[in-house]
Amino acid sequence: MHVEDNYRRPLLSLRISLTTRCNVNCFYCHRDGMVPSSREISAIDVKNICRVAADLGVKKIRLSGGEPLIRRDIVEIVKGINDVGFRDISITTNGTLLEEYSYLLKEAGLDRVNVSFDTLKLETYRFITKKDYLERVKAGIKSAVDAGLHPVKINMVVLKDLNHHEIWDMFEFCRENGAVLQLIELLKTDNCPDMGIECYHFDMAPLEEKLSRIADKVMTRKFMQDRKKYYIEDGEIEVVRPMDNTKFCANCTRLRVTPDGKLKPCLLRNDNLVDTTEALRTNDTEMLRQLFLEAIRRRAPYYDNESC
């Protein structure tokens, strides 16, 4: 069973932001469009949300933040989702705590992991994150691969004159360590303050033209904004372009959950949230189901043919 919204888009994926807290301070971070909140849903809340999501046809769960591994109950959260029956559970993390948790998370039922990691140079890492965790992140990536999490994807935000010249070095690092490189074009949204980050925007179009020429194989991911995956020898590069276009919205199959338990129909909007507080407090499964259906009803493309 798959539930579709009014635009014939099925709901297949649930992205749960477990916290707005983070132990690094990347200057370009838009906090996944989340409004800061002091309340964080419990492991039981997450499990109950996922149980209803599964009944509505959701197949994939992604946990994110902030930094989700800050949650001391992160292993319990993953185990609860696995107990519901999900077999595609992933986490997006900055990797600073990954070495400590990789094997525990794999045992609990985690399938794959995305690590936000923009540079192999210590000074550049310090500039971006304001921290000295470079070697810790490298160790976490290797630990995740060793633990059997697959795929391990490295999310590299490409920044002009800061790290764009490291793309091929990062590709070699990923290839040597059994990871996949995802190159992310810098995104600026209305949900973050203007911090003068436009000067770091790097146009990915010329790079994609080069990748198309040298790749052994190219694959298009239809439900992921028609983004391309380029296979080069025994390595893999995926290019993630900004989502301010009609293709992203037309192919969106996601619903999000905020750290305080609200259902968020659109990443780029905070004015149509559905509050699940009462349903979670009273453990009312039917109420929670109806709130999910309301959130699905509120899903609408942020960008359509008239707005782009």
Image (tube, rainbow, N blue to C red):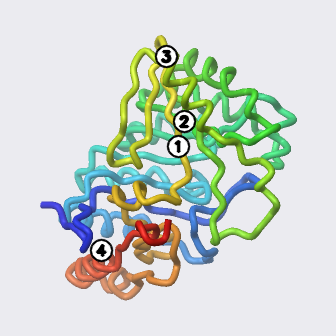
Image check: 36 left or right of 24? left
SS for callout 4: helix
Residue at 62% of width from left, 45% of height from top?
185
Image check: 195 left or right of 240? right
Residue under numbered circle 1: 240
Residue 244 in sight: yes
The amino acid pointed to by label 1 is Val
Q: Position of residue 110 (x, y in %)?
A: 39, 42
Residue at 69% of width from left, 21% of height from top?
169
Q: Position of residue 180 (x, y in %)?
A: 50, 28
Q: Is residue 291 above or below residue 212?
A: below
Residue 25 in sight: no
Residue under numbered circle 2: 182
Name which of mark 4 and mark 1 comes first in the sequence: 1
Badge 3 crowding class, 10 Å Cα cut-off, few under 14, some 14 to 19, many 20 or more, is some
Tell me how far mark 4 sits from mark 1, CA to CA. Answer: 25 Å
Q: CB of mark 4 within 8 Å of CB of mark 3?
A: no
Residue under numbered circle 3: 232
The amino acid pointed to by label 4 is Ile
Residue mark closest to the camera, 4 vs 1: 1
Residue under numbered circle 4: 296
